[in-house]
Amino acid sequence: MNETAASIGPATVTDVAAHVRALGDAARRAARALARADTRSKNRALQEAAAAIDAGHEALIAANARDRAEHPDLDAPLADRLTLDRRRIDAMAAGLREVAALADPIGEITDLRYRPSGIQVGTMRVPLGVIAIIYESRPNVTADAAALCLKSGNAVILRGGSEALHSNRAITACMLAGLAAAGLPQSAVQLVGTTDRAAVGALLGLEEYVDMVVPRGGKELIERVSREARMPVLKHLDGVCHVYVDERADVDKAVRIALNAKTQRYGTCNTMETLLVAEAMAAPVLSRLAPLLRQAGVEMRGCEAVRALVPDAVAATQEDWYAEYLAPILAIRVVKGLDEAIDHITTYGSRHTDAIVTEDLGRARRFLAEVDSSSVMVNASTRFADGYEYGLGAEIGISTDKFHARGPVGLEGLTSRKYVVIGDGHVRE
């Protein structure tokens, strides 16, 4: 089998454990080559992969259509995440080019300083090594993850969901074309060649080959990976995102932000799931927002104060405050003010993304300081919590952990640091 076929994955896999172990071994060898690759080679690989995606958009759409035809019963959010159209394919190619344009963090030496002994001590940014990505539905993750891992000098093993198999194979082929054109090992980007769920367990036990695993998908997947992985995990479990409309908010801004945060896309982890409104703003905000949500087909679930203002709202339960709907459903609660809003977010939130709408700088600063989430926003939609929007080019995922990276994880989050010491014949006295 040639390297291209091996990296995409064989048509059939009879020994899942042996297949996954072979991927790990090849990835470890490729990681050593990538660690010494220069920036020009990595950038060329990304540019050539983007060109392959541009040239192959019809083949990508056809592969995606095959996936969707084989899985017609997916619910609406999953079907939306699976779908590739020309706009999303163009965005994938643009993401690769943006990653190529980013500064290469590898080899950067910072904080170099002289010590009393005469030696210089600093830190150098280095790759993690081999990263495994386990993900569901979204085929664009294949391109994003491969691009970020490549630019940061890491080899990657991709294990996508069975519902996106044909799309992932087609996108991986474009990435391999880029690697080949740049003279880099194609085993730097490998796709697990089986949809057998045993492959996930085998991958999670490869601690001698894999340095970090990133699960991207539903709560069940992320909990399994967190439980079974023998290596560090970069994860978030839920995206229970809030927008709080403060009593000193601008009503126009509040309505525009809340509507966008909920309806711009439903099936994403940075979509607003709970709207909190200060009681002084409940009537003016909900009288304008509720008809727009209704028109968009959003089911509103509210507390008693909300239902008094929006009679067709469903009574919210305790479970609604914890819910990540990923659907056109919104929980709404009227709160007394900023303190109660922060208490609600602390109790029910998932430390993903939370926003305040206010014209009061002091209240904005309190919200920024006291809400313990990976992204905290003032007068902006939660939908901006994204690596591309943050200037990272793309993201490997969004981490709600505090170690070693938090929030949208781009190039720097896929690296570590080592100390470097420079002397001139120095010996310790």
Image (cartoon, helix red, strand yellow):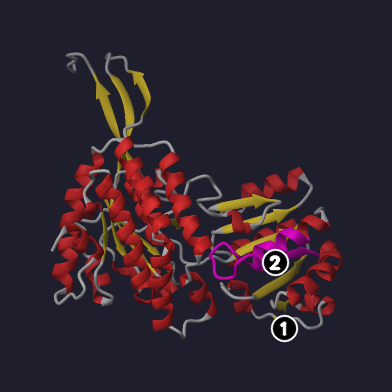
Report x, y in % for residue 282.
Answer: 82, 67
Q: Amino acid at mark 1?
A: Val
Residue labelled with disc 2: 275
- In the rendered image, the vertical position of residue 100 relative to residue 61, given as above or below: above
Report x, y in % for residue 357.
Answer: 74, 54
| Number of marks in picture | 2
> Can residue 31 be seen here?
yes
Q: Secondary structure at mark 1?
A: strand
Residue labelled with disc 1: 314
Q: Amino acid at mark 2?
A: Leu
Magenta-colored stretch includes residue 340? no
If the image is split into quadrants, where does the C terminus sit? Answer: top left
Q: CA distance from mark 2 to mark 1?
A: 14 Å
Residue that protrudes farthest toward the bottom in the picture? 73
Q: Quadrant of residue 239?
A: bottom right
Please report the residue visible at 58 percent of the width from the left and 57 percent of the height from the top: 353
Callout 1: few (<14), some (14-19), or many (20+) C-alpha neighbours within 10 Å?
Answer: some
Q: Is residue 104 left or right of residue 79?
A: left
Please report the residue visible at 81 percent of the width from the left and 69 percent of the height from the top: 286
Q: Secondary structure at mark 2?
A: strand
Magenta-colored stretch includes residue 278? yes
Task: Report if the CB atoms under discs 2 and 1 are less than 8 Å apart.
Answer: no
Q: Which residues are magenta?
A: 255-279
Report x, y in % for residue 320.
Answer: 62, 77
> Can residue 400 be seen here?
no
Relative depth, front residue between 423 and 337: 423
Callout 2: few (<14), some (14-19), or many (20+) C-alpha neighbours within 10 Å?
Answer: many
Q: Quadrant of residue 384?
A: bottom right
Please report the residue visible at 56 percent of the width from the left and 50 percent of the height from the top: 389
Q: Is residue 265 left or right of residue 398?
A: right
The tag earlier along the polypeptide, 2 or 1, is 2
Report x, y in % for residue 222.
Answer: 39, 68
